[in-house]
Amino acid sequence: MQVTINVKLVNSKFNQAYADKENEGEETEDNIKYLWEDEFDVQGNVTQFKVNNNTSYLLNGLYPNNDEFSFEIPDMSVIECTLDNGPLTLFPFSKKAISKTEKVETKNGMTFYVHLKSIREIVNPMTGVYILKDDYPKELLELYNDEEE
């Protein structure tokens, strides 16, 4: 099956009552519902889709000097998509950052929506990974901040 993951950062200042009254329930330029949106089509035929709540995620990568790092991030929700040719694709989210999720069946598969809260800062170190800044490894945060400047 074809799986799409849709991630939206919900604007905590969005006022639905104002939108209902002033713009037929829709957002306006000064009352934006979502601050940003990412969408991923999982490449390949997904044979198993699973959401693991209350789990840990192993964040692996390389420092700028090519030394490897590995940090266990607790309190995560991890979406697992198993492909028919064996590989596993993971989409990890800090559990406390999630506002709501929704699974919608489509003609060829499904779309899984993840709405994130905007009240706390989220670090997005690589495509499809969303970790609360408070939970992100401090030494990596320093590197991440250096790259953004």
Image: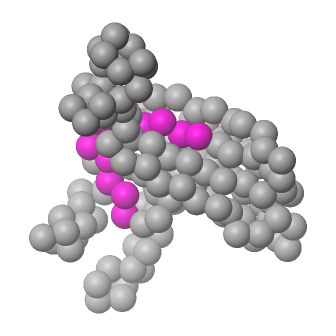
Residue 138 against residue 24 in the figure, above or below: below
Determine whether, in the image, residue 51 is placed left or right of residue 105.
left
Q: Residue lying furthest bottom in this view? A: 65
Which residue does the image show at 37% across and 38% down from the upper left? 34
Does residue 122 show up magenta in the picture? yes
Q: Is residue 118 visible?
A: yes
Instruction: Determine which quarter of the picture holds residue 14.
Output: top left
The answer to whether residue 74 is seen in the rendering is: no
Q: Position of residue 133 (x, y in %)?
A: 28, 47
**What percent of the width, then of the height, locates residue 129?**
47, 57
User: Vertically, is 63 above or below 102?
Assistant: below
Q: Nearer the viewer, residue 147 or 1?
A: 1
How many marks the image carries: the answer is: 0
Residue drawn where x is 58% and y is 59% of the image? 40
Whether residue 49 is in magenta: the answer is no
Q: Residue at x 29, y 89 (%)?
A: 65
Q: Residue furthest left?
A: 149
Q: Position of 49 compared to 138: left or right?
A: right
> In the visual, does 147 lie left or right of 79?
left
In magenta, the rendered stretch is 113-125
Left or right of 39 in this view: 22 = left
Quadrant where the image shows the N terminus: bottom right
Task: State the residue in front, 22 or 40.
Answer: 22
| Residue nearer the viewer, 131 or 32 | 32
In percent of the image, x 39 and y 14: which residue is there? 20
**Is residue 18 depicted above or below 13 in this figure?**
above
Q: Residue 68's spot in the image, x, y percent?
A: 41, 80
Q: Quadrant of the C terminus?
A: bottom left
Res. 51 image quadrant: top right
Residue sitting nearer the eye, 137 or 122: 122
